[in-house]
Structures are given as C-alpha cells and as structure tokens.
Amino acid sequence: MSQSHRVAKLPIRMRGFVQPDTESQFEGYVEAGTYFVLEEKPGSPTPDTDFVRLEVPTLGALDTWVCTRWRTQHYVSVTNQAQPPPAVRLPFDDDPLAIAESQLVTLLQGLKDFRYDLDQAYYPWDLPGIRVPRAPPLFNNCCTFVEALTVKAFADAHGANFAWDSRRHRQMMIASTEDFFSPVTAAVESGMAIPAPSADAHPHPWTLIQGWRNPWRSGHSFLVVDHHPATDKALVLESNSANGLDGVGYRGIGNLRDIGLEPPEGWWNLPDVWTWRKLCSTYLFRQQAWLKVKDRSLSRLSATSP
C-alpha cells in the first residue's frame, strides 16, 4: 500500500499566523494552492475554529498556521494524498533522439563560470536557427542556462534532424502569457523530452521543470539531474542567485566554478540539498518534462532506484 500524507488546499490567498490563533502575530500571506500539513488543531483556540500548520518554504519561518474553519464556515479542505511512487528510470536506449549524458556534462564546462543576472543574459555559443547574444560578459539567467545547455547538446548530437527556431526560443523565454509552462512545451514538442505523468510525479533523471511560486510571478526554470527516493532529495542543476548559488551550480551544494562539474559523493545526505517535497511546496504551480538522456552516471545513482 502506498504511503499518504495530509494536504491542505487553499482556494484563496490566506493569512498565516505564528500560533493557531488569529490574535497571534501575522507571519505573511499564503498563496492559493496545495500545501503539506505538519500539524492539525481542531477546536483551537476555541471550539469555533480549526487550524492547521502548513509547510510554506516561501515564508521566512518555513511554516505557518492557517485558520481552516470558523463556526460552520470552512475555508480550507484537508485530505489524504497518496505519495507518488519513484519514477521508472527509462533508459532511452532505443530512442533515436536520445543523447548521452556525457554530452551535457562536457557542455557544462562552458557554462560553469557564468554568474546569475536576471536582466543581463548571454550565451557561451550560438544555437541553431536563432540569433542569441554571445558572452562575454559571463552572465545568464535560469531560462538562458537551460536553453543553452539542452538545445546545444541535442543539436550537436543530431544536426539537421533536430530543429530549433525563434518560436521555440520564445517558448524557452516564456515570451507569451498563453503558456506559462512553455519551456516544458518546447522541450516536448522539439523531441528533446517526453511529458511527465503528472506535475506531482517524482522527477526522472534529467527532468526539466518550469515552476512558479504564485500565479504568475516568481517563476524559475531548472533541471533535476536525479532524485533519491529513500531520502526524497533532488539534485537540482540551475542558474540562480539563491540557495548557495551565484550562477550555475547545484542547489544547496555550490557553484560549478567552485566544486567542479560533478556533485559530491553522497549528495543526497547533505542537509542543504532540497527534497522533492520542498520543491513542490515552493513551486506550487509547475510542470515537468523528462529529457531523453541515456548512459547516465553523473548523479552516482544506479540505473535502478536505490
């Protein structure tokens, strides 16, 4: 039988409090979405109210209390949600558009010295079918990092059999409000990836994720190199100016220019590496695509789930 956890679905933005009491200190607003429940207090502080303590990584305190009921009026639904099983680790050996992981790792050498800048974004190389600003300076952002790495790798491997153009580029840059998950759409439509079973599914090795902290602000494009089911830790590769990074690196581990291209052995035991659960709680709105990458060894996880 699969394990489950309690989740709370907030239909609207709500106030969070330090204690399960609306008279206690206000901590901040909790955006509409689904959150993991850490604790429940029915009939507290009076029989007229129920409270839950939610995991909210976007708040400074990381968790907060929300009122779910006042008298007969219920604001929030709290239910059991089954945990998704570990992702099936597809080899992609027979897919003609798959690439070897070594091609991505080799390209990381040309990206490791880039620093993050939201507004100044450059590429270390040209990409097929489009004109992009070339470095120096060595600045990029999350979207240009993902595009530079993935498109270059697939284009080098497949040449004319892999098509890229200005429309795909605009999708990677999320240039239209018609699709807030357009980097995922571009990866799938171009043949680089397959769609994930769901947004909640545990990430597959080399997963591209477009996430939003709230609709539709504070977006982020990043890659999950692998997921360790036993600890729920995710090896996130990104360009960022937070979580121990100032440029291209592994979240909670360090910049590639400081630690090298490979993550440390036993990265899943490091305290600052994020869990998939924390990523889901932070990026409440997200979609993912599984890149067609074979011959994988960078994460040091075996071909089957550990």
Image (cartoon, helix red, strand yellow):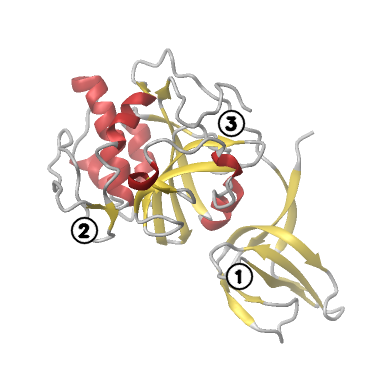
Image: 262 above or below 116: above
The front one of 274 and 181 is 274
* Three-letter amino acid code of the residue under disc 2: Gln
Of mark 1 and mark 2, the one earlier in the sequence is: 1
Q: Is residue 117 left or right of residue 211?
A: left
Name the element at disc 3: loop
Q: Position of residue 26 (x, y in %)?
A: 62, 82
Q: In the image, residue 68 lies at what x, y percent?
A: 73, 70
Distance CA(mark 3)–CA(mark 2): 36 Å
The image shows residue 29, relative to residue 283, as above or below, that is below
Q: Secondary structure at mark 2?
A: loop
Packing grade of label 2 (10 A; few <14, some 14-19, many >=20) is few
Q: How many callouts does the rendering have? A: 3
Relative to 194, residue 30 above or below: below
- Determine the residue positioned at 59% across, 22% down: 304
Q: Residue furthest top?
A: 94
Q: Which mark is residue 120?
A: 2
**Local crowd at mark 1 within 10 Å, few (<14), some, or many (≥20)?**
few
- Residue behind mark 3: 87
Residue 279 picture location, percent across and down: 54, 51
Residue 151 visible at all: yes
Q: Name the kind of residue labelled 3 in the image.
A: Ala
Whichever of labels 3 and 2 marks the residue nearer the N terminus, that label is 3
For the residue pair 63 and 4, the one nearer the viewer reads as 63
User: What is the quadrant of the N terminus in the image?
Assistant: top right
Q: Nearer the viewer, mark 1 or mark 3?
A: 1
The residue singled out by tag 1 in the image is 61
Q: Position of residue 62 (x, y in %)?
A: 61, 65
Numbered disc 1: secondary structure: loop
**Residue found at x 66% / y 84%:** 25
Q: Quadrant of residue 293?
A: top left
In percent of the image, x 56 and y 70: which residue is there?
60
